[in-house]
Amino acid sequence: MPYVLIRGNLASYSHKYPFRVLVSGLKAADIEQLNRFPCGGYSDESTIVYLQHPCIILTALEVLGYRVVASSSTAVKQDYNEYMWTMRKEFVEPEPFSDTSITVERDNLANFGREVNNIPPNNKIDVPE
């Protein structure tokens, strides 16, 4: 189950781009789903900057199946309006591997030598000359 980190401000930094949200850990399919939101580029190789209010990005991620599991505010005094959210996405667990298929394969392998010995000796293979 992948985790995603979101850091965003609840008060605007400037008039041109009032909000900035950094999202780290998204998979390619989720990034494609969020293409409709204005993007400010990449902060690093795993972090994308969205120029939206954090609630919009959090809601979009919830629609994609992510759930908030933790949140906190930053400790830096000049950025008192910044918050961090941790989200995670549940995946359907694959069905457990069945032991019966292993037993069938073992039985087939155990009988392999017996089946070869039961072939009648008169079987000839026609080989073209």
Image: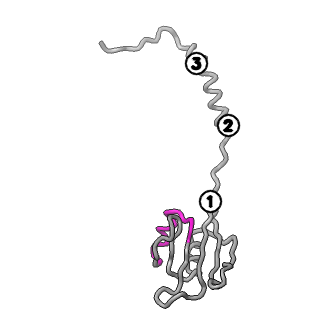
Q: Residue at x 65, y 34 (%)?
A: 102
Instruction: Locate the N terminus by quadrant.
Output: bottom right
- Dot placed on the residue nearer the N-terminal end, 2 or 3: 2
Q: CA distance from mark 1 to mark 3?
A: 44 Å
Q: Residue at x 50, y 77 (%)?
A: 50
Q: CA distance from mark 2 to mark 1?
A: 26 Å
Asked if disc 2 and disc 3 are in contact, CB closer than 8 Å, the reply is no
Check disc 3 and report the residue beneath it: 115
Report the span colored magenta: 23-37
Task: Residue lying at the far left in this picture: please name it.
Answer: 129
Kindly identify the amino acid type of the residue bearing the numbered disc 1. Phe
Check disc 1 and report the residue beneath it: 91
Q: Residues within 10 Å of mark 2 (few under 14, many from 20)?
A: few
Q: Residue at x 66, y 78 (%)?
A: 74
Q: Nearer the viewer, mark 2 or mark 1?
A: 1
Kindly identify the amino acid type of the residue bearing the numbered disc 3. Glu
The answer to whether 22 is drawn above or below residue 97 in the figure is below
Q: In the figure, residue 93 lies in which quadrant? A: bottom right
- Dot placed on the residue nearer the N-terminal end, 2 or 1: 1
Residue 32 point in image, percent of width and height? 47, 68
Task: Residue lying at the far top in this picture: please name it.
Answer: 122
